[in-house]
Amino acid sequence: MMTSVAIKKQRHERMIIMTQATITLSDKNKIPAIGFGAMIDPDQTYDAVRDAINAGYRHIDTAAGYMNESEVGRAIKDSGIPRDELFITSKLWLQDYGVEAAQEGLKASLKKLGLDYMDMYLLHQPFGDVVGAWKGLEIAQKQGLVKSIGVSNLNAALWKQFVPQFNVLPAINQVEFNPLFQEKELRAVMAQDKVPLEAWYPLGHGNQGLMANPDLQEIAEKYGKDVGQVIIRFEVQEGVVTLPKSSHQSRIKSNLDVFDFTLTQDEMAIIHSLDTGKGTYDPQAAGVEQFLRAHIDVHQN
C-alpha cells in the first residue's frame, strides 16, 4: 500500500508532466498540449477557470466573442500563478477586422483580461477583411503585444485562399476536430507548412454515439479511464492541441488526467477508423457569416 507521502509525490510528478507536455507551433514557440476551453456561460466562467488552474491547467482559451474575457482575467489574477507560467489565448471578433481595428481589438482583449501581452491571438472567423485583420496582428506581434498569432475555422479551401496573402505564417489553426471529424484534408495542407491543429469540440460535443462506442469503451476499461479521456489521449498523440471545456469540477480534472497511459498503434487505428469526414460547422455554408454578425456583437456593451 502506498503511503500518503508516496501518493503526494506521485501526484506532484503527474502535475509536472501535465504542465510540461507541449506542442511546437510553426513559429517555434511552445503551447501546452491541453488547454481549458472557456467557451462557457460568463456566469460560470470565473469558477470554472479557477477550478481549471487549480487542477493543473496552464493554458486557457477564451475569445472576445465569448463575452467572458473579464471573468477569465479575474480568475487568472486570483489564481496567484505567475504570468510566465500561463499560456493565454483569445480571439478577434468580426467587428474588429481591419488593420487598425484588429490592433484595437487586441488591446481591448488585453485590457479585459488584465494582461500586458497575449501568448496567442487568433482571427476567430474567416469573414470580412481577413487579410487586413491579419496585418494588424502582424503589427501587434512586432510591438510585443502578442507572442504568437494564428487563425481559426479555416478549412482547406480557406487556408489556400488566405494564407498565401499573409506575410507571417499562422502559428496554429483552431478548428473543429474529434474522432468523428479528423480534418484529414486540412491537416495534409497544413502539414506542408508544419502548422499544428488545435481542436474545439474535441469530444464531439458530447455525441452520445461516440461516447457509447463499444471499441472506445473497451479501450477505456483497459486503462481504467473513461471514453472522454481516451479521446483526449488520442488527440494528444496525434499532435493536436486539445481544448476540452466543462463547468463541472470533476470533469475539468479528469480531462487533464491523460498522461499516465499511451494508446497502442492498433488502438490509434481503431479511433482513426471512426472518422466520418463530416463536422457540425461549415464556415462556407450559406448564411453563416450573416448569422454570426447578427447574433454576436462585441461592442454591444
Image: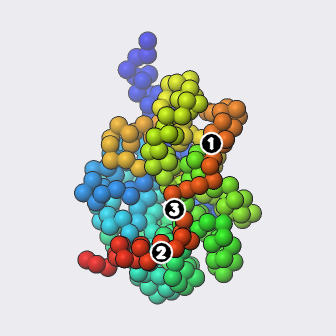
The mark that comes first in sequence, 1 or 3, is 1
Could you say where residue 67 lies in the image, as x and y percent from the top left?
32, 67
Q: Residues within 10 Å of mark 3 (few under 14, many from 20)?
A: few
The answer to whether residue 150 is seen in the rendering is no
Whether pointer 1 and pointer 2 mark residues with C-beta atoms closer than 8 Å, the reply is: no
Which residue is pictured at 35% across the width and 44% down the height?
54
Could you say where residue 230 lies in the image, as x and y percent from the top left?
54, 36
Give the answer, above or below, for where 255 lies relative to 291. above
Q: Amino acid at mark 1?
A: Leu
Which residue is pictured at 50% across the width and 48% down the height?
204
The mark that comes first in sequence, 2 or 3, is 3
Q: Secondary structure at mark 3?
A: loop
Quadrant of the image containing the C terminus? bottom left
| Residue to which mark 1 is pinned | 274
Which residue is pictured at 41% across the width and 81% down the height?
95
| Residue to which mark 3 is pinned | 281
Q: Residues within 10 Å of mark 2 (few under 14, many from 20)?
A: few
Could you say where residue 298 lies in the image, as x and y percent from the top left?
34, 75
Q: Amino acid at mark 2?
A: Gly
Distance, label 1 to label 2, CA atoms, is 30 Å
The mark that comes first in sequence, 1 or 2, is 1
In the picture, the disc for residue 287 is 2
Could you say where residue 175 lies in the image, as x and y percent from the top left?
55, 60
Give the answer, above or below, for where 17 lies relative to 127. above
Q: Secondary structure at mark 2?
A: loop
Q: Amino acid at mark 3?
A: Tyr
Whether pointer 2 and pointer 3 mark residues with C-beta atoms closer than 8 Å, the reply is: no
- Whether residue 146 sits left or right of residue 179 in the image: it is left
The answer to whether residue 300 is seen in the rendering is yes
Q: Residues within 10 Å of mark 1 (few under 14, many from 20)?
A: some
Q: Residue furthest front?
A: 286
